[in-house]
Amino acid sequence: MAGTLFLVPTPIGNLRDISRRMEETLEQADFIAAEDTRVTVKLLNHLGLKKPMLTYHRHNTDSGGQAVIDRLLAGESCALVTDAGTPAISDPGEELVARCAELDIPVCAIPGPCALVTALAVSGQPTSRFTFEGFLAMNKKNRRAHLDALRGEERTMIFYEAPHKLAATLADLSDAFGPDRPLTLCRELTKLHEEVRRTTLGQAATYYRENDPKGEFVLVVRGAEPVQEQEASLEDGMALVDKLRGGGLSLRDAVRQAAGELGLSRKQLYDLAVR
Ligand code: SAM
C-alpha cells in the first residue's frame, strides 16, 4: 500500500506559528521533501528533529518528483515543505499532488500559515469572494494579458510580489485599475516589522517610486464596482411597443413582447398603451 504525502505549511516569519500537528507530522514522516534543505534544516534544528531529506523545488519537479513518488509507492510517508507558507501555493507542490492524484496515492494537507489568507483576513477588503492571482509575469505581453483579463473583476484580488519588483507592479496595477482603487499593502506579516497599510494604488505607486521597499509584500486590491444595470421605465416600454406595432404586431402582442424584453409589468404597460 502506498504511503501518504503530507503537505506541511511552515511559518511565514514567526516560529511560534508552528502547530503541534505540523511538528508531529514532520516527526512521524519517513522522509522530508524540502524546497531548500538548508532552510528546512534550521526549522528541524529548532524542533530538535533529525530526518532524511531530499530536495524538491521548481527546477527539479520531474526528477525530484519521481524520487518522491517512487518512495511513496514503496510505502514510505513523505512530508513536503517549502521555505515558508503552504506548499503548492505559489510554491512547489502542485505537480506532485496532481501526480499523486493520478496514481491514487493519498495526500493529506495540514492547515497552517499562508500569506494570502493572512493578508486577506487583515485587509479590511471584502472577503466573501476573492481571487488569488499570485505573481504577475515578468514577460510584458503575458503581464498585460493577465491585467487585461482582470479589468472589470469585481472580486477582491490578491497578488504576491517581490520587493525589487514592487514599484513596477504598483504602477502597472494603477494603470490597469485606476489610481483611486483601494489597496491594502501587507508587509512582513507575522514578523517584527509587520505593517498593514490601507491606501490606494496611485498613492502606493508614488510612495514606492521614491522609497525602496523592504521585506515581503502581499497586495490586496479592491474589486471593481459592480456595473448597475439601468432599469427600463414604462416610457422605454411604450417606445418599444410603438416600434413593434410599426413592424406589424397587434397591440396585445407588442405589449407582451415589450414587457417581457424589458422586465416591465404587462398590465401597467397595456393600461398606458390603451390610454
Ligand atoms: N507558499 C507561500 C504561502 O503560502 O504564502 C508563498 C510563497 S511565495 C514564493 C512568496 C511570496 O509570498 C512573497 O513574495 C510574498 O508576496 C508572500 N509572502 C510570504 N511571506 C510573507 C510575509 N511574511 N509577509 C508578506 N508577504 C509574504
Image (cartoon, helix red, strand yellow):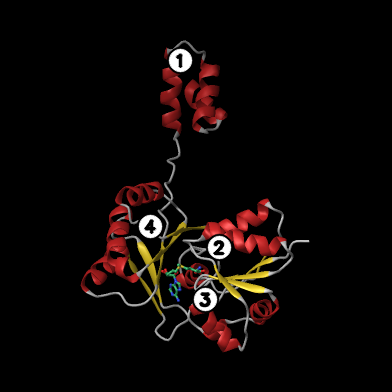
Q: Is residue 202 above or below residue 12?
A: above
Ligand 1 has an atom within 8 Å of the beta carbon of the residue at disc 4: no
Does the CB distance between marks 1 and 3 fall below 8 Å? no
Q: Name the residue under label 3.
A: 37
Could you say whether the residue bearing mark 4 is in a helix, strand or loop? Answer: loop
Of mark 3 and mark 2, the one earlier in the sequence is: 3
Does the CB distance between marks 4 and 3 fall below 8 Å? no
Could you say whether the residue bearing mark 3 is in a helix, strand or loop? Answer: helix
On the question of residue 275 being in view, the answer is no
Ligand 1 has an atom within 8 Å of the beta carbon of the residue at disc 2: no
Q: Mark 1 points at which residue?
A: 245
Q: Distance between the residues labelled 1 and 2?
A: 73 Å
Tag 1: amino acid: Arg
Q: Distance between the residues labelled 3 and 2?
A: 13 Å
**Which tag is nearer the camera, tag 4 or tag 3?**
3
Q: Is residue 51 above or below residue 107?
A: below
Tag 4: amino acid: Leu
Q: Is residue 3 left or right of residue 214?
A: right
In the rendered image, residue 234, in percent from the top left (x then y), is placed at 45, 32
Q: How far apart are marks 2 and 4 (CA)?
A: 26 Å
Of mark 2 and mark 4, the one earlier in the sequence is: 2
Badge 1, how many Cα within 10 Å: few under 14, some, many 20+?
some
| Pick the front one: 63 or 212 | 63
Tag 3: amino acid: Thr
Q: Mark 4 points at which residue?
A: 136
Could you say whether the residue bearing mark 1 is in a helix, strand or loop? Answer: helix
Q: Name the residue under label 2.
A: 64
Does the CB distance between marks 3 and 2 fall below 8 Å? no
| Pick the front one: 6 or 34 | 34
Could you say whether the residue bearing mark 2 is in a helix, strand or loop? Answer: helix
Q: Which mark is residue 153?
A: none
Of mark 4 and mark 3, the one earlier in the sequence is: 3
